[in-house]
Amino acid sequence: MQAELDQLCVVLVAPRNPLNIGAAARAMSNFGFLHLRVVNPYDVAFREARSAVGASQLLANAEEYKSVADAVADCTLVVGTTAVRHRELQHPLKRLEYGARVIRKQLGSGRVALLFGTEKFGLATKDLSHCHWLMRIPTREEHISMNLGQAVAVCLYELSRDPKAAQRPEKVKRASAGEVERINEVLLQALRASGYVNPRAESLTEDKVRRLVCRLNLQPEDAELWLGMLRQMLWKIRGGGK
């Protein structure tokens, strides 16, 4: 069972309060999830958080990253968490109990990243563009937001509740987020070179393209094929062979 749990990475994106990071680490240790990744933490002294009772080593071993893309590069499934609120989502949204089942099956065949956003705003639109789908904790409408540490604890409890799920792993192997991101980069270069991208809406186009490629759920060999085709197209667009 621990082998499957080791395939999950909890990724905290731009957390502001070291106590929340410590509480998340404590919850991870409670349920046996030991891989914490932190993207651009507000306070660089988060490793000393007193709230990480019994999880000081887990917190000390936390990996820091400058971007979500780097933090999830080796993962084959990236799931974002959201309280939804009034934002318009561009991803499939699953309730925690259903999403947890899908994640547990994937843990048997590949690494999974579970993303939590900053305490005040949650995950930004650009962060969400790296996700395959989103998951929400079914709180009441009158009070939908949860403390970061509590949200991590609730999600991990649900993930650890059905140990048999990991015995039925996904049969289809997925390309890693890093492989998919390389496709995104070359595709965007080709789109810019062709004049498709409006410079005034470049960031919006990038997010749309990343979501589109994520939805393809490419297998590793397909990802290599797409990358080769796109590189050839880009070479031709730029005048290669003349």
Image: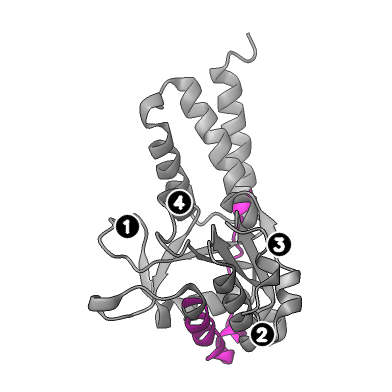
> Which stretch is magenta?
151-178
Task: Please state which amino acid type lies under the numbered disc 4.
Answer: Ser
Task: Give the residue number, with chain letter if any, for mark 4.
Answer: 129
Q: Between label 2 and label 3, give the one nearer the viewer.
A: 2
Please tell me whether residue 93 is drawn above or below residue 2 in the rendered image.
above
Q: Magenta span: helix, strand or loop, mainly?
A: helix
Q: Is 192 on the left-hand or right-hand side of 228?
A: left
Residue 232 pos. (x, y %): 61, 27
- CA neighbours of label 4 inside 10 A, class few (<14), some (14 to 19), many (20+): many
Which of the two discs, 2 and 4, labels the residue nearer the N terminus? Answer: 2
Which residue: 68% across, 63% down?
45
- CA neighbours of label 1 inside 10 A, class few (<14), some (14 to 19), many (20+): few
Q: State the SS at label 3.
A: strand
Q: Quick one: quadrant of the C terminus?
A: top right
Q: CA distance from mark 2 to mark 4?
A: 34 Å
Which residue: 54% across, 66% down?
17
Q: CA distance from mark 4 to mark 3?
A: 22 Å
Q: Which mark is residue 89?
A: 1
In the foreground, 166 or 91: 91
Instruction: Determine whether label 2 and label 3 are within 8 Å by CB.
Output: no
Which of the two discs, 2 and 1, labels the residue nearer the N terminus? Answer: 2
Task: Give the residue number, with chain letter if any, for mark 3.
Answer: 63
Q: Is 138 on the left-hand or right-hand side of 75?
A: left
Farthest residue to the top: give it.
242
Residue 92 pos. (x, y %): 36, 63
Task: Give the residue number, with chain letter if any, for mark 2.
Answer: 53
Residue 188 magenta-drawn?
no
Which of the two discs, 4 and 3, labels the residue nearer the N terminus? Answer: 3
